[in-house]
Amino acid sequence: MVTRRDLLKTTAAVAALSTTTTTTAQAATSQPTAKAPAPSSTPPGRTWTPNGVTLPKKASRGAQVMHLVAEEVEHEFAPGLVAKCWGYNGRTVGPTIEVTEGDVVRIYVTNKLPEPTSVHWHGLVLPNGMDGVAGLTQRPIMPGETFKYEFRCEIPGTYMYHPHYDEMTQMAMGMMGMFVVLPRKDPRPVDKDVVMMLSEWSIPVGASRPNPIAMADFNVLTINSKAFPATAPIVVEQGAKVRFRIGNLSAMDHHAMHLHAFPFTVVATDGGEVPMSARFPEVTTLVATGSTKTLEFTASLEGDWAFHCHMTHHGMNQMGHGIPSLIGAELGQVRARLAKHHPSVMLMGEAGMGGMADMHAMGGWKFPANSIPMLGGKGPFSVIEMGGMFTVIKVRAPGRLDDEWYAHPPGTVADVAAAADLAADGIDPA
């Protein structure tokens, strides 16, 4: 039951947010433009990490040689939210490691963190001493040290890497990445091979660092450490065969990843290929924390299609959970009393929460410095009232790859029903 005291606390909190006018270079004071990052030019047969990079490698002394640097990084989750995180090679998520079945890898890891670390190669079959569990299979990598990991990648698949020293802190601060072992001959060649890491963060409004001791109320949900509208769109040709390699290193939560329009098949996990007899079509799959799933589909229909976590709070930005709902509340007297102290007060929520992103887009509500509460993205029709773990698959006619909004053929967009149609079908909206 919401008491009068709860209601006053809630409205005061909302009013405080609404009247905050402090801005900094990091504050979200305008809606992001509709222009999205350019489509990938990744050559066929290789993976693409939206908003990310692939770790450079070189052949030396019979191995593929790579270098990871664990360090503090400054990261923008979406326009208006920047935080000091930890990551690899100047970024979170870390660079995707991509090698080929049978390759020997020699990976040097330099520790520039203020505490020890290690790297665990999650899901890979390798010698025990290379497994990266500090205290169990190796000593920790002390600050300033560089360790060498070397092993052969025998089994193709989608894997991950992350610390196994103080992993609660280091992973919550952003230290994670994907590890892809490509087969020498792909049994199911695809036109687009996309790599995505799912993760969750606790970043209080206005804070400049994630909170690594949080066990609930994660308020920033990301794909490759970006929250919508900063997630890069995935642009493919109509009819393209598409593969999504999805990993989840969220601290506490699984993610029900839902693809609009296109049924897919889960063909592999981080444990290997799913037998043909165990595959079935679906449009939502649960990616458990600490696991990967590889799914494949054919992009058969043109359009701008959503791909997102179906856990509703995971598709929102910096939503607060410490105040009761105002839906259905009568706020007239509260609004009048608060207006005496804050003439520009703006309360919202008694009729739903969707208007918050619209009010911000119209300049009627400025976010507190370095925060993105309820931030959405510009769409072709209105503000897209989504955030967090959400991105867009843009399917285009062959030869027309672009990241502009889809141009719908006349008569194919839902709109206000004509009176003649309502009458003809016997529908009375009253």
Image: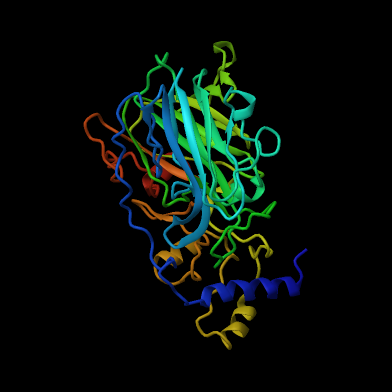
Residue drawn at (63%, 63%) of the image: 327
Q: Within the image, what quadrant is residue 336 found in? A: bottom right
Give how far across and how far down residue 426 sits, in percent. 47, 41
Residue drawn at (50%, 35%) of the image: 178
Please say which color scheme the image uses: rainbow
Q: Is residue 374 above or below residue 152?
A: below
Does residue 21 appear to the left or right of 420 in the view shown? right
In front: 258, or 289? Answer: 289
Residue drawn at (47%, 30%) of the image: 106
Q: In the rendered image, is residue 429 in sight? A: no
Give how far across and how far down residue 96 sits, in percent. 44, 36
Number of marks drawn: 0
Q: In the rendered image, is residue 130 in sight? A: yes
Give how far across and how far down residue 288 sits, in percent. 63, 34
Q: Within the image, what quadrant is residue 192 found in? A: top left
Does residue 129 appear to the left or right of 45 in the view shown? right
Give how far across and how far down residue 419 sits, in percent. 39, 49
> From the image, which quarter does the N terminus lie in?
bottom right
Does residue 43 appear to the left or right of 246 in the view shown? left
Residue drawn at (64%, 65%) of the image: 326
In front: 377, or 170? Answer: 170
The residue lying furthest to the bottom in this view is 340
Q: Is residue 164 above or below residue 317?
A: above
The residue lying furthest to the left in this view is 399
